[in-house]
Image (cartoon, grey):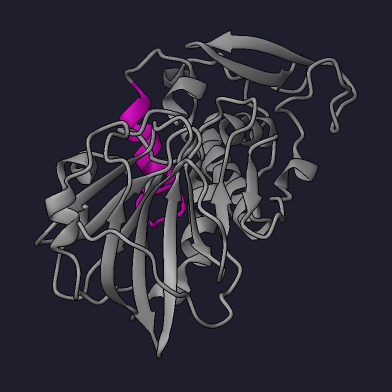
């Protein structure tokens, strides 16, 4: 790895990042997608050097593999489930998971280093130098490097279920996969082997919109109700992406701008509040160690 400091020139566009302050909520699909969109100015930039200040994250970062990316050109960024993909034009690249406190952002000129800025990438884009930083106080994030090949075929991603906003996640798919299972529908929605990227907040919200009790066994959900639920999942995620994610003491843009989907929440975090649809009470229960929120009356 190459260490040292250098000048950063030119105005940098604002982007989004994820941080946790007093919360253990992991970033979900809309937050990671917001980060991906905010980092699109990196596409086409040449990676000039990499600075590694601490390589022990959730998994140890391969310093040698990172160094070998120097000189490569960044291809269009991607996302698979809750992983951010930074591929290189000639193959390989990085698979990044933000963990519980990770932030990936483009630094502005003269920004001081934070003690938790563990990695920096220096890139050249149309004559300007951009510094991309990875900040992670809890060090539960990960940076996995693939020197050649397709990132999406890496073992981390190879056995994941379909994307909820993609063409493969349909009522027919969900009905066929679930008719022999008795696990609760909320647990199924959060299983990345069944469908990726639906975390706790958005699972509760989708079930509220589809009027399905989160404790319902998936084998009891008809093809028609799966159609309603697939629509609800996609609607919730689409709206959350448009709003820049959900801020619950954790998600903010690098400029300090929060995600605004929390203003649309109808179930998650609403314990004891009247349901926006029927006026009954929103209840909180625990499922697989996670908080679940639902209406006791109109979700059945």
Does the segment drawn in magenta span residue 289?
no
User: Which residue is at the front of the view, 178 or 61?
Assistant: 61
Q: Looking at the picture, how far across and down is residue 114, in whole percent?
A: 52, 46
- 156 relative to 215, above or below: below
**Image quadrant in which you'd find residue 94:** bottom left
User: Which residue is at the front of the view, 62 or 207?
Assistant: 62
- 127 relative to 189, above or below: below
Q: Looking at the picture, how far across and down is residue 110, in whole percent?
A: 56, 67
Q: Looking at the picture, how far across and down is residue 158, in whole percent?
A: 18, 44
User: Which residue is at the front of the view, 268 or 214?
Assistant: 268
Residue 186 shows up from this direction: yes
**The magenta segment:** 163-179
User: Which residue is at the front of the view, 230 or 50?
Assistant: 50
- Name the residue: 59% across, 34% down: 20
Q: Is residue 295 left or right of residue 236?
A: right
- Name the residue: 69% across, 42% down: 247
Q: In which quadrant is the N terminus drawn?
A: bottom left
| Residue farthest to the left, as pictured | 148
Q: Is residue 152 left or right of residue 27?
A: left
- Name the residue: 55% across, 25% down: 24
Residue 153 shows up from this direction: no
Q: In which quadrant is the C terminus drawn?
A: top right
Does the segment drawn in magenta span residue 169?
yes
Q: Looking at the picture, how far across and down is residue 42, in whole percent?
A: 41, 73
Q: How many marks?
A: 0
- Name the residue: 49% across, 22% down: 185
């Amino acid at each position: 790895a190459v260490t040292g400091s250098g000048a950063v020139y030119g105005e940098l566009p604002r982007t989004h990042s994820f941080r946790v302050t007093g919360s253990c909520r992991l970033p979900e699909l809309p937050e990671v997608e917001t980060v991906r969109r905010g980092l699109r100015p990196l596409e086409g930039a040449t990676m000039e050097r990499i600075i590694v200040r601490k390589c022990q994250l959730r998994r140890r970062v391969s310093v040698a593999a990172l160094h070998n990316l120097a000189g490569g050109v960044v291809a269009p960024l991607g996302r698979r489930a809750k992983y951010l993909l930074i591929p290189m034009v000639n193959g390989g690249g990085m698979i990044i998971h933000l963990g519980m406190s990770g932030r990936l952002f483009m630094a502005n000129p003269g920004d001081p280093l934070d003690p938790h800025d563990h990695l920096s990438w220096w890139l050249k884009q149309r004559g300007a130098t951009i510094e991309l930083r990875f900040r992670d106080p809890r060090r539960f994030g990960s940076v996995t490097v693939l020197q050649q090949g397709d990132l999406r075929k890496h073992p981390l991603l190879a056995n994941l279920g379909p994307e909820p906003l993609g063409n493969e996640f349909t009522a027919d798919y969900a009905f066929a996969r679930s008719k022999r299972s008795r696990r609760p529908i909320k647990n199924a929605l959060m299983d990345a082997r069944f469908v990726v990227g639906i975390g706790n907040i958005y699972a509760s919200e989708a079930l509220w919109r589809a009027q399905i009790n989160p404790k319902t066994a998936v084998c009891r959900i008809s093809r028609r109700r799966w159609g309603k639920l697939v629509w609800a999942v996609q609607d919730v995620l689409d709206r959350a992406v448009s709003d820049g994610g959900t801020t619950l003491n954790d998600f903010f843009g690098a400029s300090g701008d929060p995600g605004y989907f929390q203003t649309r929440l109808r179930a998650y975090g609403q314990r004891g509040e009247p349901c926006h649809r029927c006026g009954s009470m929103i209840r909180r229960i625990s499922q697989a160690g996670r908080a679940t929120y639902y209406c006791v009356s109109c979700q059945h």
